[in-house]
Amino acid sequence: MAATRIDCDIHPAVGGTRTTLLPYLSDHWKEQVVSRAIDGLDLNSYPPSMPLSGRADWRPADGRKPGSDLAMVQRGAFDQLGASHAICNVVYGAQAVFDPYMAADFCKAINDWIAAEWLARDTRLRASIVVPIQAPDLAVEEIERRAGDNRFVSVLVPSQNETLLGRRHYWPIYQAAEKYRLPIAIHAGSAYRGAPSSIGWPSYRYEYYLAEAQAFQAQTLSLIYEGVFGKYPGLTVVLMESGVSWLPAFMWRANKTWRGVRVEVPWVEREPAAIIRDHFRVTMQPFDAPMDATSVADIIDQIGSDKMFLFASDYPHWQFDGDDPVPPHLPDSLVRRMCEDNPLETFPRLKLDA
Amino acid sequence: MTRHIVARTSEIPAGGNKVFGLEGRDIVVFHVNGEFFALLNRCPHEGAPLEKAACVARLTSPEPGIYQRDRVGEMLRCPWHGWEFDIRNGQSWFDPTRFRIRSYPVAVESGAELQKGPYVAETFPVHIEDNYVIVEV
């Protein structure tokens, strides 16, 4: 096992707004969440009771949410799964509420909480900054607030929010992210502003989960076609819990289409797949590949860059059984890259000895 | 290489083109900004007739929302799938070395010069008072 193994996607859980976050809210929002009984803002994308939200052996025996107990997360992510460091991505509904000021205060509280109760208690942990993406100016304020703390290594946004992430509306966030060397981590999860499939509302939960790939594709194209990487050439985007194996066909088709329609977006001067290889990274749980070595080799070859892959367990989400989050049949050289080199390149603020 | 006298310059209107059968190939001659350009009349992608291509500007952009047009009319945009090619050398915009249209040298010469030889008019008489388009194949 590699000595350095940076898990780029684990999920500490907010126990509740009126409990976990209460000490970190401003006085106004303390009073509001108590008097208005605001709580339980778990995203519909990850209801805590759903099996995917927590593997059985990673659920606290007392019924609390999976990922809510630091000691248990330490045992799972570090002792059992062998990470040397791990990046905490708090997926909670703070980013989904409509009131931008409530969202901003809840996000700030989450970041204060994760700093005080997780990062301060285990130097192997890092975190993404949770931002109120629906209010870009407030999101920039939150990024500025954390910029001096290198334990925050990325900016977390849900894959499905109010509109496509390439829109100019969001550019101030990318300007700040580039300035402070923070990749934008797009994590699966919907604020349910619209139907999670582009056609409409699915009847079944797993339709939603598979439709997440559509959202990641749409976000990737939007960021490229709107010209974000020409404007902010230092920006990196990490697709988290996106699945990976859809990339080859998507990259090929994006190139093919761009050849004919690039006059719509003349600022896209290179093939989209080349931009993806340079600016996008993916966490490797789930990988969603067939179980045979040849297919895995083909997918890696077709994606065409060994820099894109990031080791991740997605703890405590139930993506795999056993003790090894690394998908089968990946070449050793790639596993070494995705555990250490790629995370360090992707998250430049992440210093191992900090 | 054989030089073919294909047309009087006045037969290909400015901004237009005309197709000629030369040595078993369809060759399209464009008249753009006072110059003539000859290319194989066939897109290297799926074979679309390039006589139907739009002659457009070369479009670049330093950043989103800024459209820089130069060499107006000197890019061909294929009528079928929109691939763009440089009318001067046939190179595609997206992959100039791998995808290109075969292009042919073109000259414009006066009837007076042509009558001195060694060129032979193809199918029509060469008049001393006219100018002619010559394509080398």
Image (tube, coloured by chain):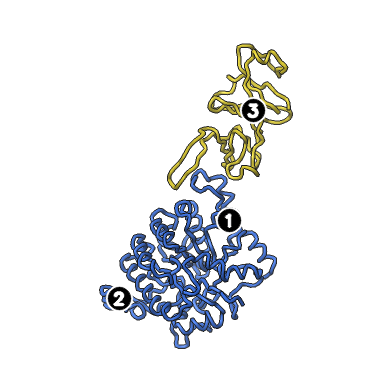
Q: Amino acid at mark 3?
A: Val
- Give the letter of the blue chain: A
Q: Earlier in the sequence, mark 1 or mark 2?
A: 2
Task: Kindly indicate whether the residue at mark 1 contacts the one at mark 3 (C-beta within 8 angstroms).
Answer: no
The structure residue drawn at horizontal position 68% and vertical position 69%, both measured from the top left corner, is: A292
Q: Residue furthest front?
A: A353
Q: CA distance from mark 1 to mark 2?
A: 45 Å
The residue pinned by badge 3 equals B19
Lateral position of residue B78 relative to residue A25, left or right: right
Q: Are marks 3 and 1 on the same chain?
A: no
Q: CA distance from mark 3 to mark 2?
A: 76 Å
Look at the picture and state if A61 lies above or below B19.
below
Q: CA distance from mark 3 to mark 1?
A: 38 Å
Q: Amino acid at mark 2?
A: Val
- Please tell me which residue lies in front, A299 or B46: A299
Question: Does residue A95 show up?
Answer: no
**Colour chain B is painted in:** yellow
Lateral position of residue A119 relative to residue B121, left or right: left
Q: Position of residue A89 (x, y in %)?
A: 46, 72
Badge 2: how crowded within 10 Å, few (<14), some, or many (20+)? some
Using the image, name the chain to which the residue with label 1 belongs.
A
Q: Amino acid at mark 1?
A: Met
The residue pinned by badge 2 equals A33
Lateral position of residue A163 relative to residue A24, left or right: right
The residue pinned by badge 1 equals A251
Using the image, name the chain to which the residue with label 2 belongs.
A
Using the image, name the chain to which the residue with label 3 belongs.
B
Nearest-to-viewer mark from 1 and 2: 1
